[in-house]
Amino acid sequence: MTVQQSEVEAGAKQRAGGWLRIDLDALKQNYALLQQKVGREIAVGAAVKADAYGLGVARVAPALYRAGCRRFFVATVDEGLGLRPLLSADAAICVLNGPPRGSEALLLASGLTPVLNSLDQTRRWAALCRETGRKAACLLQLDSGMSRFGLSEGDLDTLCAEDLPDALDIAFVMSHLACADDATSSRNEGQRRAFETLRRKLPALPASLAASSGIFLGEEFHFSLVRPGYALYGGNPTPALPNPMHPVVTMLGGLVQDRWIAPETAVGYSARFVATQKTRIATLSVGYADGFHRRAGGLTSAVLPARPEISLPVVGRISMDCMALDVTALGDMDLPPGTGFELIGPHRPLDELASALDTIGYELLTSLGKRFHREYIESSQ
């Protein structure tokens, strides 16, 4: 008997061990909130690198375009090539890592905009412009104090001495803040001033400094363009304050089985958890292969969406494909196989989980595995 493809697809949700709900309406609301924050005169771009922070660029980027975004940021050329067919021609796709040697003509032909981070990249892009007789668009990145990407003051002096800016169509001059998530850090103002000093060596050009957290440092950091990423996806851009963004991601782990165990019974590898009383253990089919960190046992908890007031500790070591919850607090409540437990979502915020695991929400999102059944929520397109 042959199984039809439609039958396979129809049962995918039931077969999945975990589910991701990605609320595109909330994503668009977050975009609108950030646009309101900076004002209509300032452009709001979107970082969609790393498959839109693990949430699926094929669905996320078009939704952001519908929300009004016209400038998108990816990390690599191949990310840009994959994104280009998904967006209209009026959407600029900027490649943050710049053009690898020999890729300049491909970027130009594909309608991608490189971020030029070094003298070498700038010279190669200027050479292409001169060869083709076309001032092709680019962004020029200056190092204002992060020592990561960008031209130093000396590089910038050399660039100007070689008249390279005259060969380029520089859409924006940009830099990146190292400590924007700490509004009390003096380094933020130091970088802003350094950026202003470097910009003065160039003709007057539109500028961009702030990403998600930088937007909340004040209007003097906004310049002509802001480049949010994490905040769009529901992450908190103001860690010392309540999260102003709408939650976008809900992660649910599906129940495989549950059992009552006796006192002194161990759970999981290395017997890291041993029951001290009669305990009800629920096994979920989500593990570290799905991006739920191996060290999470004993550090975080889940909830049953129907009973969100009850915290259910994650116990024992996380396995590759499964994990255990202590659901004793649910008593003898009926839990059919397939019941979903919320691991990330409105009741278990992404940033709280990240803090418990001594990491950041960015890492959790970009570590999401491919086995989740993904459901995208969007009321209108």
Image: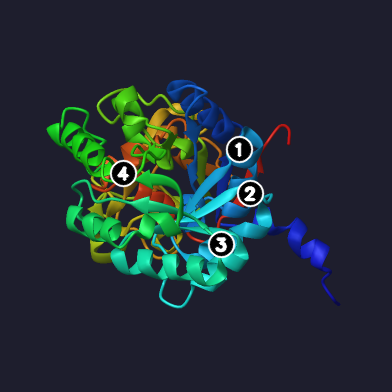
* Among the two numbered marks 1 and 2 on one chain, the one whose residue lies closer to the N terminus: 1
Which numbered marker is on residue 24? 1
Q: Quadrant of residue 310?
A: top left
The mark lying in front, picked from 4 and 3, is 3
Is 119 placed above or below 28 here?
below
Q: What's the amino acid at mark 1?
A: Leu
Task: Classify the position of the N terminus by image quarter.
Answer: bottom right
| Mark 2: secondary structure | helix
Q: Which residue is mark 2?
A: 59
- Can you identify the residue that label 4 sits on? 354
The residue pinned by badge 3 equals 134
**Label 2 – label 4 distance at C-alpha:** 25 Å
Q: CA distance from mark 1 to mark 2?
A: 8 Å
**Who comes first in sequence, dot 4 or dot 3?**
3
Spatial separation of the CA atoms under disc 3 and disc 1: 38 Å
Q: Is residue 184 left or right of residue 297?
A: left
Please report whichever mark, 3 or 1, sits nearer to the chain's N-terminal start.
1
Mark 1 or 4, closer to the camera: 1
Amino acid at pointer 3: Arg
Q: Earlier in the sequence, mark 1 or mark 4?
A: 1
**Circle 1/circle 4 CB separation < 8 Å:** no
Foreground mark, 3 or 1, reads 3
Name the residue at 57% across, 49% down: 92
Q: Is residue 79 visible?
A: yes
SS category of the residue bearing label 1: helix
Eye-nearest disc, 2 or 4: 2
| Residue 263: % across, % down | 27, 49
Q: Secondary structure at mark 4?
A: helix
Q: As shown in the figure, which amino acid type bears the numbered disc 2?
A: Arg
Q: Split into 4 quadrants, where in the image is the C terminus?
A: top right
